[in-house]
Image (cartoon, rainbow, N blue to C red):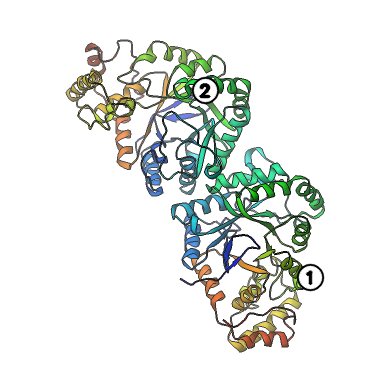
Amino acid sequence: MTVLEKRKIGNTGVELTSLGLGTSPLGGCGVRVPFTDFEAVVMKAYELGVRYFDTAPLYGLGKSEHSLGHVLRVNGIIEDVVISTKAGRILKPASRSKRAESLYGINWIDPLPYVDEYDYTYDGIMRSFEDSQQRMGVDGVDILYLHDVSGVWHRDSYDLYLSQLRQSGYRACDELRSSGAVKAIGLGVNETASVLQVAAEFNLDCSLVAGRYTLLNHQPLEDFFPEAQRRGIAIIAGGVYNSGVLAEGSKGAAAVRTYDYQTASPEILKRVEALEAVCGEFGISLATAATQFVYSHPAVTAVVQGALSTAHVEANVKAISEKIPPGFWSVLKAKGLIPEAAPIMAPAA
Amino acid sequence: MSDLARRPLGKSNVRVTSLGLGTVPISGFNADVSYDEFEQTILSGYAAGIRYFDCAPMYGFGKSEHFLGHALRVNKLRDDVVVSTKVGRVLKPASRTKKLDSVYGIEWIDPLPFLDTYDYTYDGIMRSFEDSQQRLGLDYIDVLLVHDVGRAWHGDRSEFYWDQLRASGYKALDELRSTGCVSAIGLGVNETDSVVGVSREFPIECALVAGRYTLLNHEPLHSAFDELLSRSVSIIAGGIFNSGILASGTSGATATYDYGKVPAAVLDRVKSIEAVCEEYRVSLPAAAMQFVYAHPAVATLVMGAKSSAEVDQNVAAINERIPPAFWNALQSADLLPATAPLPAEA
């Protein structure tokens, strides 16, 4: 078993392994995932040292939570891992509900028979959390992320949901945290702006942010990370491959070497090729560089990666634990591929 | 696979097989049961023709529902079976809840980390039902039974909970039924009084009644079953072995009668029944099961099982051929009342 490094989320008592397993793909995001695959992937991650698992009501419309709770319980490891789930969506029986319109319109394959409904009010957050407890069969969860509190996601409705949070939602989060039902509160989003906006109003312990700080996108260095560090908000980084291109490489099939779920532009592909050249020189994989670049930032507490197969899990564990030869990062900086200012924290010995 | 007979629950469109599988014994009732054993038992029941499965929030504090939902989903059986669960208890996180004092004081082995609180109000029943949906992962639930309402369970508190049910709980049940969230409503109890009582106030389709009508207890023949028949309330019969004695017989080392020591008079009675069984080469469990199923008020027998072997025994017993003369012999020996309906020849 790999022993993965652990970092704490402030003084919440929650400690995360460098790698967490995200269960959105396992929830059936566009592909059919039999339960046996779900179980195999979770158990492989555990076997390889992963002790942090992220789920959400949205993923498979409850199925990811139900299956994750079941797998962790029947394998007797539920007390041994950190679990995060999300709040902000209530699941209702599909036959008597109207489906929420979401920007991405994810096609869940073989989900639970529910549809999701946004609700960031006190009642909504409490109900979302309590329903998650029932679906997973757990007494509490370690981390609760407010899901998709984001202008990028909600667009014109963002103000409405933000005002739900302000009027009563924050109070639910506060109560859940102070009662010990959850140990840490954060946002689970695809942008940095809303994290800063909410952080200015409510005391966040952490946030799961997807695709914002990567080998190809360094924008958080300027404003987001310094502010998150100043406020003591631990960042859990998702989407470190920018949805594909940093895992598949420039030679990957166009359908999978995507950049933030879109076709990668020629400019992006050129940068990826340049990164690949340096990786080749040092004998490491692009995925390793992409994963450890993100984890090297001191604001980042853990990297969360999804997986659909045990081979995926093995590749992800290799990417976080493979040793990077000294000099690699300086070459990237010398070539202008990553900013001079990007901090590269030495891995714990 | 045997083709089990089906009967409707009252005037609902729910039709249940003659045997239903109860999930108490596989939810950690005095024994640690793994999920694999749970699933095997369910699948054996299905393979043997059982199409009705009963669970409850209380069983393993949510575990029976969580496991049953999972087993039905991954094996793709949901649309092929009838599921009943219960309302009246809301499960709360164990670390922030006070434990209930219950009459029976069941100690679930390795339950989900929840505790139960009674609530028969509108809000309580709705919440109980909606939580069951989430634990089961189901959109609708065929049969919803109000769990343990009545004096047998609640004793002096029974009036308090009756009032909750009357003041608002019935309204929740009515809404759940009329919106199609559930297809049939009933009670899940250990007595007939509460069933008759509720059926006079609120239309129900069925009632799961444990241990009240058996080879040894014919009390519902006096009036309860007639009245329930006239109101189209079907009985889901549980506890038909009176907790053990009618399965194990008098030679069974651990035989119990309604969860207690077997009284001498009961023991004598069982010995007499066994003698007739011997004479006609009928097994005692088969006689116990077929006697109960012969009553027109009874729609199905719900029986727990801890293993595939127990499921198979039960299915064999409901299908066992019993000569009509056997029943007449029991009646002649005064072991059955003359008013008891007897099984017709298969």
Q: Amino acid at mark 1?
A: Ser
Q: Chain of mark 2?
A: A
Looking at the rendering, which quadrant does residue B283 occupy? bottom right
Q: Chain of mark 1?
A: B
Q: Mark 1 — residue?
A: B223
Q: Is residue A190 left or right of residue B83?
A: left
On residue A157, which mark appears?
A: 2
Q: Is residue A275 left or right of residue A228?
A: left
Residue B292 in sight in this render:
yes
Q: Position of residue B80 (x, y in %)?
A: 49, 59
Number of marks in the rendered image: 2
Q: Amino acid at mark 2?
A: Ser
Quadrant where the N terminus of chain A sits is top left
Which secondary structure lies at badge 1?
loop
Disc 1 versus disc 2: distance between alpha carbons?
Answer: 62 Å
Which secondary structure lies at badge 2?
helix
Q: Above or below — where is B174 with respect to A131?
A: below
Residue B88 in sight in this render:
no
Q: Residue at x 46, y 66 (%)?
A: B47
Q: Is residue B43 left or right of residue B7?
A: left
* Residues at circles 1 and 2 in contact by the CB criterion of under 8 Å: no
Q: Position of residue B187 (x, y in %)?
A: 69, 57
Q: Residue at x 62, y 84 (%)?
A: B277
